Image (tube, rainbow, N blue to C red):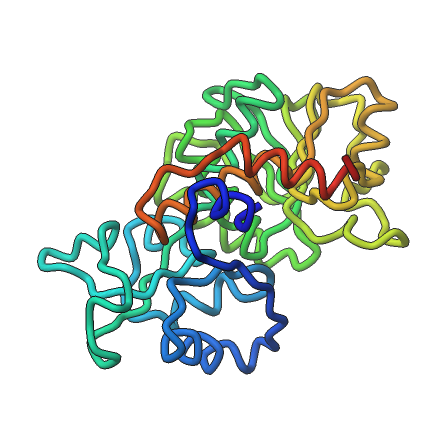
């Protein structure tokens, strides 16, 4: 989606994908800075690791505790990292890596747009407590959901986030484990569903899809995961991760270029890739 966006704005830029082992993440960030990259996107499992590897954390990264976007630049006086100068504005020793989080706002925006669901006062079951799950949990709590239930394969991670939400958002009722009653939304923030032979992230022996009216899966490829297929069969409203992908990418585009992102160009590119249009 980024390359069509650059072309639409007449920018001589290129977005490239690189597979980096977590143990080499710091070296990869430093290498990109040395080569004059404008910035980077990070995905699983790098978002939490990068928090300790960038020079400066934007307020978004501090608030949500994960970095999915890096901007290389010279932070101006006053620490206004949002308007950092491009790498060419300073010598290599002056250029800093600035970490942002563009995922959190994208999550809630796409839920409102794609599911027509208002989060204030809602009851939510969130599957996953990794980097994406932690960001989603904190963002949902900040939106004043009424109740938030966290389920994760490693129970201690869910309990850790539960404690943080109780401290930061005391008005939100939060618990680790499956709810006993009906919820408004089930959200998948795990990677289960990326592979064809993956099991569903939801144990329906613990919680039935008939107990919710909407299901959101952060996965966008495949476009319909086993979870979403089961949710449709249960007559739930459903949405995949395309909206989140586009909105987080558009914000990253603006951080790097300083220009408004051509949102519809980016959306068409993603949908064309995912749905083979």
Query: Residue shown at 87%/23% (left/top)?
Result: 233
Residue 8: image x %, image y %? 48, 40
Quarter occupied by residue 43: bottom right
Q: Does 217 sit left or right of 159 as displayed?
A: right
Q: Camera-side residue: 43 or 6? A: 6
User: Which quarter of the rendered picture does the N terminus lie within?
Assistant: top right
Residue 187: image x %, image y %? 65, 36
As drawn, 132 above or below 220: below
- Most extreme residue toward the right is 197
Q: Camera-side residue: 136 or 10? A: 10
Quarter occupied by residue 220: top right
Q: Does 132 sit left or right of 154 as displayed?
A: left
Quarter occupied by residue 38: bottom left
Query: Residue shown at 45%/79% (left/top)?
Result: 26
Query: Residue shown at 80%/22% (left/top)?
Result: 210
Residue 22: image x %, image y %? 57, 76
Total of numbered circles in the picture?
0
User: Which quarter of the rendered picture does the C terminus lie within?
Assistant: top right
As drawn, 249 above or below 33: above
Q: Does 85 sit left or right of 246 as displayed?
A: left
Q: Does 61 sit left or right of 89 as displayed?
A: right
Q: Camera-side residue: 12 or 122? A: 12
- Most extreme residue toward the left is 77
Residue 228: image x %, image y %? 79, 33
Q: Camera-side residue: 76 or 203? A: 76
């Amino acid at each position: 989606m980024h390359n069509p966006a650059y072309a639409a704005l007449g920018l001589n830029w290129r977005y490239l994908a690189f597979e980096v082992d977590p143990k080499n993440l710091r070296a990869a960030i430093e290498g990109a800075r040395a080569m004059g990259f404008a910035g980077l996107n990070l995905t699983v499992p790098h978002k939490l690791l990068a928090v300790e590897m960038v020079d400066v954390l934007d307020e978004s990264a501090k608030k949500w505790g994960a970095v999915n976007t890096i901007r290389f630049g010279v932070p101006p006086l006053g620490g206004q990292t949002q308007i950092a100068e491009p790498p060419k504005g300073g010598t290599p020793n002056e250029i800093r890596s600035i970490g942002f989080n563009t995922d959190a706002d994208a999550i809630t925006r796409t839920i409102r747009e794609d599911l027509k669901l208002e989060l204030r006062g809602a009851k939510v079951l969130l599957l996953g407590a990794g980097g994406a799950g932690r960001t989603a949990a904190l963002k949902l709590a900040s939106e004043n959901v009424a109740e938030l239930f966290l389920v994760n394969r490693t129970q201690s991670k869910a309990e850790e986030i539960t404690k943080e939400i109780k401290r930061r958002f005391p008005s939100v009722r939060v618990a680790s484990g499956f709810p006993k009653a009906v919820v408004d939304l089930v959200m998948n923030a795990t990677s289960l569903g990326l592979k064809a032979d993956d099991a569903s992230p939801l144990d329906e022996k613990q919680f039935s899809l008939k107990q919710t009216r909407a299901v959101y899966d952060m996965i966008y490829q495949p476009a319909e995961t086993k979870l979403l297929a089961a949710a449709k069969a249960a007559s739930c409203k459903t949405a995949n991760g395309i909206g989140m992908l586009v909105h987080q990418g558009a914000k990253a585009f603006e951080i790097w270029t300083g220009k408004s992102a051509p949102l519809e160009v980016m959306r068409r590119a993603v949908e064309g890739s995912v749905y083979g249009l």
